[in-house]
Amino acid sequence: MPASGGERRRSARGTEHRREVERGVFSLRRRLQILVSVLVALIVGAGAIAIVIIDNRDDAIDEILFRLEPAAAAALRIDAALVDQQAAVSGFVLVQREDVLEPYQRALTRQAAALADLEATLAGSELADRVPRLRAAINEWRTEVVEPQLSSTRAGREAEARALATTGQQLFRGAREEVRLLAAAIAERLREEQGSFVAARRAIAQTVAVNVLVAIVLLVAVTILLRRWVTDPLDHLRAQVAAVSGGSLRRPITPSGPLELATVGEGVEAMRVRILGELEAVRRANEGLAQRAPAIVALRDALSPKTYDLPPNFKVAVHFKPAEGVLAGDWYEALTLPGGNVGLCVGDVAGHGATSAIVALRARDLAVAGLRLGSSPDEALALVSESLNDDEDETFVTCFVAVIDPDGRLSYANGGHPPPFLLAGAESDAVPLGPTGPLLGPLPGLWETVEVRLEERSTLVVYTDGVVETTGPDGEEYGTDRFRDVVARAGPGGAQSVIDAFQDDFTAFDPGRPRDDVTVVALTTERARPRG
């Protein structure tokens, strides 16, 4: 709707206001840039100080965690390995059995690994030169005492082995003393690094306290400035917008405040004018819709599913929810056929709305007419497909047609429809009835009728793709597997049990408003047990 002369004048005044603001010294953007620059400078300065302190703290932590504490642990392992070796050698000298030396070999392996860890951990530190002295003391004890003891014992020279054990105590104590001295040096260095860590932590706490104080001062200053620059002009704009949203659409929005807020006010004013125009368009559209409403209602009534009187041993239950209110692309029909047969047709037209509903009505009527005239399920599908070949819109339809005779024989044809599930018996799995031909549409196709023998009590569950393709809040589809599990659990209870279980599970899935038609049709048939 074109803007009135008064509205054009108000728009011109808003443009002039913006130009006046632009001639000012600072716009809101410039003011905020200066304020942000000051804040960034303070943050960078405080950050630089904090980084230096944190680096010192991290160096102390690294020294403690990755050098000194592992080194102390390695020293303890070396000392324990020395003790285990001495004990094993002494036991071997006494009992002269090789199995007694197994702890010696294990301790020797642990000692070598601990020495390697110690060298790697202390490499480059002031304690690194102590490791070679420790290794030399250990090697001297082992070569001068342990190995001769083992050789003498194996040779049967017990007196010589015992003598070596007595004289070797000094070398053993010397090796352990080297371990003790190294452990003491490590402990001293660990205390120094812990002191550095405590000092760094104290400095960090002081820096945080200063930064908090500065932040409080800046927060107060920023609050005052933002109130002057932003809050007050926004309150003015909000009051005007609230009046318009409350129903005063004819009340103009007067831009105020800095350049940026004035631009927002102009945008809101333009939106108000556009809303007035759209309301006028909606009013005219409603008038046109009111004129067409009788035709839409007639189409809805004609497409409404009807279940004819079925034999008493057949029960039908349905869940049917269109995606767009009253007109759907899904359809179904259950009817009694000549000879005591029962027919079931379920279809899904691509899309939904008025156009899909018209195609669905024609497809349903053709399929039902074919069955009434004695056509087999595949012939009924061919009849529907031929009618779609005449369409210029290239509409596609999936359709499932089934006929059940009094002897318990199910004949069906599936034209590209999601495979229905058949539960034959009281405790059977849900068996899918796959496609027997392509979907129905402008392209020609061939369909086949398949026969299945039913049990005394069987349930057929037919559904459309809107069921399994519906997504929940997390974007996950409801899915065929989940639907099949529901059908398998509830199937022994009959048609109504299946529909009730599906509705409960589908509601728990929380699909919101489905984007496609959702249809589930369950048909249960029971036959009298034949007399023997």
Image (spheres, rainbow, N blue to C red):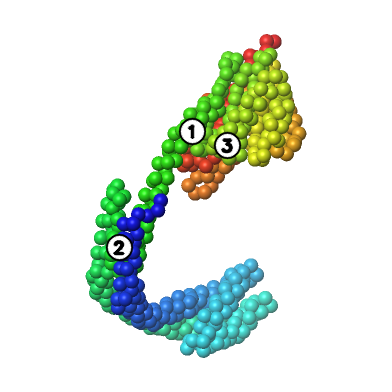
Q: Position of residue 360 (x, y in %)?
A: 60, 32
Q: Which residue is mark 2?
A: 255
Q: Quadrant of residue 490?
A: top right
Q: Position of residue 102 (x, y in %)?
A: 62, 69
Q: Which residue is mark 3?
A: 355
The local secondary structure at tag 3 comes to helix
- Tag in front: 3 or 1: 1
Residue 282 vs 447, above or below: the answer is below
Disc 3 crowd rating (10 Å Cα; few below 14, some 14-19, many 20+) is: some
Residue 44 appearing in the image: yes
Q: CA distance from mark 3 to mark 1?
A: 14 Å
Residue 212 vs 295, above or below: the answer is below
Q: Which residue is mark 1?
A: 292
The local secondary structure at tag 2 comes to loop
Which one is nearer the viewer's eye here, 194 or 146? 194
Which one is nearer the viewer's eye here, 287 or 443? 287
Label 1 or label 2, whichever comes before in sequence order: 2
Disc 1 crowd rating (10 Å Cα; few below 14, some 14-19, many 20+) is: few
Q: Position of residue 329 (x, y in %)?
A: 57, 35
